[in-house]
Amino acid sequence: MLSTKQMARCAGLALAAFVLLTTAPYLSYGAAQEGSSAKGAPSKTASKKRSEGMAPKQFGEEYAGSQTCQTCHEDIYNNYRKSAHTFVETDKRGGWTEHGCESCHGPGAAHAGSADAKEIRNPAKLKPVETDKICLGCHLNTAKHSERIMGGHAKSAVACTTCHSMHAKGPAGLVLRAPADVNAQCSSCHLSAKAQFAKPSHHKVPENSMTCVDCHNPHGSARPATLQTFAANDVGCIKCHTDKRGPFTYEHAPMRQEGCGACHESHGSANPRMLNRHEVRLTCLECHANIPGAGQSQAGVVPPAFHDLRSPRYANCTVCHQKIHGSYSDRNLLR
Amino acid sequence: MKTLCAVFLLPLTVFGQATPAPVEAAASAPAAEVASPVPSSESWISGYMELGYRSRSGIAGSEATYRSIVNLGEGLKLTGTDFTILDPKKRLFERLRIRAYDWGGDPWSTFHIFAEKRGIYKFLGDYRNLTDFNNLPSFADPTLSRGLVLNQQSFDTKRRMGSWALELFNGRMFSPYVMYDRNSSSGRGVSTFRTDGNEFAIPELSRDATDLVRAGVHMTLRRFHLTAEQGASIFRNDMNSYVARGTGINPGNNLNPVLGQPINLSSLLRATGVRGNGPFSRLTATASPVSWLDLFGHYMYANPRNEVNFQQLATGSFVALSQALFYSTGQSILSATSYLPHKSASFGWDLHPGGRFRATQSLWTDRLNSNASALTRDRLALAGNLVVGSTTSLLDTNESRVETNIFVEGPRHITFRAGHRYVWGTAQGSIIPAAGLPGAPYSVLDRQVGLAGITWRPGSRWSLAADAEVGKGSGAWFRTSLYDYQKLRATGNVKLTSSLRLSMDYRKLHNENPYSGAAYRFDVHQEAASINWMPKSERLDVQASYEHCSYNSAISYLQPQILAPALSRYREYCHTISGMVTANLPSLVKGVPMKVLAGGAAVMTAGSRPTTYYQPTARLNVPVTKRVALFGEWRYYGLDQTFYLYEAFRTHILMTGVRFSR
C-alpha cells in the first residue's frame, strides 16, 4: 500500500513523463552534444532542418569545409580528428558533416581565401561569455551543467576554453585527464589551495592519488565551494569516508549543518587530522563554550565541571568522545 | 605478489604487439568512412609505463609520524602507466584509456579505465586501494606525562574503493546508464573504553562496506534535458574490541584512586554491528525554452536507514559516581534504529537577452530530518541494579538560499557583477529524555550577503578577476560560523613575455560574531604568486610559486572546571615555496633529450603550532633508446614541530627504474 507521499511522488513523475512525451515532438530533435551550435549555423538552414527533420544541411558559399581548413592547419585538424569532437564531422544528425571546424569557428571561406586571421572567428580570443555561448550551444542542456550558474567559474567568467582544449590535448581528449595534469591545471589559478596541500597533514592530491575534481565540480554545484555530492545529496566527502555517513543514533550537528569544514581544513593543515586548530580541545570548546546569551547561535551541550582542562586526561576531548562524527550507541559520543 | 606481477606484465604485452595497419583499410573506404581518428603517421597506441625499485635510508625520528604523513615503502613498484588506444576501425571501442599509479605496496594505488564507442556505450571504471594510517600522539595522548607516547585514537586501515559506470547510447536522445560503487575498509586501531573516573586505551577492529547501485536515464534534446536516477545503498559496519581476561590489568589513564579505590579494567568484550540501506532518487532538468532564457532544476531525495546492535561486557574495578557504587562487572546492550530523510532541491534561471546585460537567479533548499530511537539495558553487577531505558534522538535542519547576480559587459572585455544572497534556516535537535547539562536545542540561520565582482579577460595575455562578499548575519548555526564577514578574492594571470607567465592569487576573510560573550574574530589572508618560464628553445622549464598565509582567530569560552573566562587563540603564519626546474639536455639518443628535474616544496609555519616540512626532490631521466629510458629519483622528507619534537622525522628515499613509452 503506497503512502500519501509515495503516491504524490508517483503522480509527479507520471505528470512529468506525460509533459515530456507530449512536448517532445515540438522540440527540435538533435541530442545536445550532437553539434547544433547556437551561433554560426545558418539560420535558414537550421529552420529548414527543423522542418525537414533529418535532411542534410545546405551550406552556402561562405562555408569552406573542413578539408579546406586541413590544408593549412593540418596539425590542429589531426588532433581534432582524434578528439571526441570528431563526430561533429561525420554525424549527419548534427548537420555539420564535413564542416566541423566551422561549427565553432563560423564560415571560413573568406579566411581561406585571404588567410587573414581577422576573417575567422577564434573562440579563444572572444569574450568569455561569447566563447561559452558557442560551447553551450551544444553542451548546455546536459546533467553536467545543471548547476552551472551556482558555480564560481561561471560567476567569474572563466571560459570553457580555460580548461578545455577544443582541438584535444594529444590523444587524451578535450581536457587533461591524468591526475597530475588535472591538479596542475587547477593549481595554476588556485595557488593558495596548492600551497595548503604542501602542509604535512593533507589529502593526497600532491601525490596524485586524488584530483581536485574528486571533491569539486568545476562546472558548478549548489554546494559551497562547488563540492561534489554523493548518493544524491550527501556531501562529496562521504564518497570516500562512507563510515561517516550515518545516519547515527546520536548525531553531531555540525556534521550535518556546517559539514566537515567546521573542524577540518580539507586541503591541508599543519595540525594533525587536518584540524583547523592546533589542539583538539580548542576545536571543541570554541562551540561548546559554556557561555550563555550568545544570540541564537549557541547550539550544542556544554561540558560539565569535572572536565578539568589542566589534567592531560581532558586535554583532548576525542580520547573519550571518540565517535565525534556521530555515535551509534552513546548520546555523549563516547563509544 | 601475483596481482603485482599481473599488473606489471599485462601492460608490457602492448610492447610486444605489432602495430596494426589500419591506414590501408581506411584509405580504401569511401570518403565519409575515412573518419579514422588516427592520422597515418601516428601510432594507434600512446602512453608510458614506469617500473622502479625504491629504497629508503631509514627513518630518523618518529616512524609513526612518517607513516601517518608519507608512508612510502620499499620494494618493486609500478609507479605509473598511462595508455590511450585509438582503434581506427572502431570495433569494440573508439578510445580506450588505462591508467594505473603507485602499485606494489604503496599506500595509495589507483587504477582507471575508460572505454567509449560513441553512440553505443561509454564505460568508466575507477579503483583505489588506500592505506589509512594515523598515529600522531599529539592528537590524543593523555599519558605523555607518564612517558607513554601513544595516540589513543590511532588507526591502521585499508580502504578499497571501486566505481564502475556503463552508459549506453551515449550522446543520443535516450541514454540509460547503470553504476556500481563499492567502498570498503578494514583494519585495526586504538580506541577508548570509558567508565566513571577512568579511561582505558583498548584495541579495536573495524570493518565497513558500502555498496551503492544506481541506474538512470539521460534524455537529451536540443532545448531540453532530463536525468532521472534511482539508486540504493547497502551499508555494513562492525566495530569490535576484545580484551581477554588474564592479559593483565589495564590501569587506564587515571592512576589516582577514586573514592579510595583504583579503577581498572580486567576484560572487555564490545561489539557494535550496524546494518543499513538507503534508497535515493535524483531528478535533474535543464531547458532553454527560448534563446534568451535557460532554466535549471534539481530534486534529490535520500532516506538512509541504519539498525544498530551494541553489546558490551566489562570486568574490573569500576565505580558509578552518580550512585557512589563500586561494581566489578558492567553490561550494556543497545538496539537502535535511525533514519535520515534528506531532501534537496534547486531551481535557477539564466536570463541573457543579448547586449551587455545578463542576470541569473538560483534558489536552493536542503531539508534534513534525522530521527532515531534506541532501547538500552545497563546492568551493574554487585550493585545488582538493572537500568532499562529508551531514548529518542532528533535533528531537523532546514536551510535555504536564494542568490541573484546581474552581469554587465563593459568595454574591453570587462565584466561587472553585482548580486545578493540571502541564506536562512532553522535547526532543532533534542534527545529525549534530556540528561546532563542543557544545551540550546534551537538555532536560526539568517544572513544577508552583498556580492560584487569584476573580471577582465581581454585574451590569453591578461586575465584579472576579483570577487567580494559582504555578509551581515543575525543568526548562525554555531559561534564560529560566518556572521558579519567580508570575503575578497583576486586572481591574475599575466603573460609578461612569450615565455614568461606570472600568476597571482589573493584571498582574505574577516569574520566577527557580534553577540556578547562570543567576542569572535577570525582573520585569514593568503597571498600567492607563481611564475612559469619556458624559453623558446624548450631546453628549460621553470615553475616556482610562493605563498604567504596568516590565520588569526580569537574566541572566548569558559573553562568548565572553574567557569573562568579563557581565550581560544589560534595563530598561523606560513611561508610555502614550491617549484620545479626541468632541463632538457643532449643525450646519446637523437631526438630524445636527457631530462633533469629538481625542485620540491617547503612549508614553514609559525604561531600556535610551529612546523617545518621539507620535501625536496630531484630526478634524472636518461634515454637508452627512443622508447626506453632509465631514471633515478631522490626525495627527502623532513618534518619538525617545535612543540612536539617527538613527532619529528626525516628520511631519504631513492628510486631507480625504467620507463617505456610509445
Image: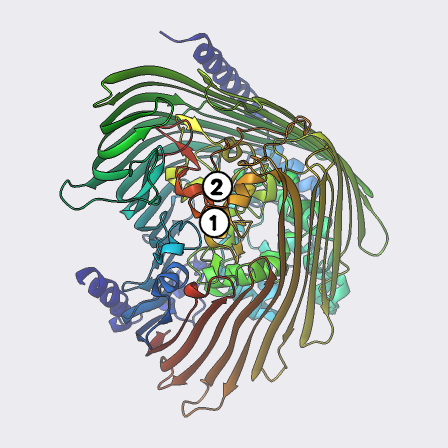
Q: Residue B424: horizontal and vertical position, in percent?
A: 67, 26
Question: Could you classify mark 2 by the number of other residues whose Cα lies within 10 Å: few (under 14), some (14-19), or many (20 or more)?
Answer: many
Please identify the residue farthest to the right as the structure is shown: B411
Q: CA distance from mark 2 to mark 1?
A: 8 Å
The residue positioned 50% from the left and 35% from the top of the image is A255
The N terminus of chain B is located in which quarter? bottom left
Q: Residue A323: horizontal and vertical position, in percent?
A: 39, 37
* Residue tagged 1: A214
> Is residue A33 something that shows in the picture?
no
Please identify the residue farthest to the left as the structure is shown: B246
Side of A299 relative to B201 (left or right) = right
Mark on residue B585? none
Relative to B311, say whether B166 is above or below: below
* Residue tagged 2: A236
Q: Amino acid at mark 1?
A: Asp
Q: Chain of mark 2?
A: A
Q: Residue A122: horizontal and vertical position, in percent?
A: 70, 59
Report if the CB atoms under discs 2 and 1 are less than 8 Å apart: yes
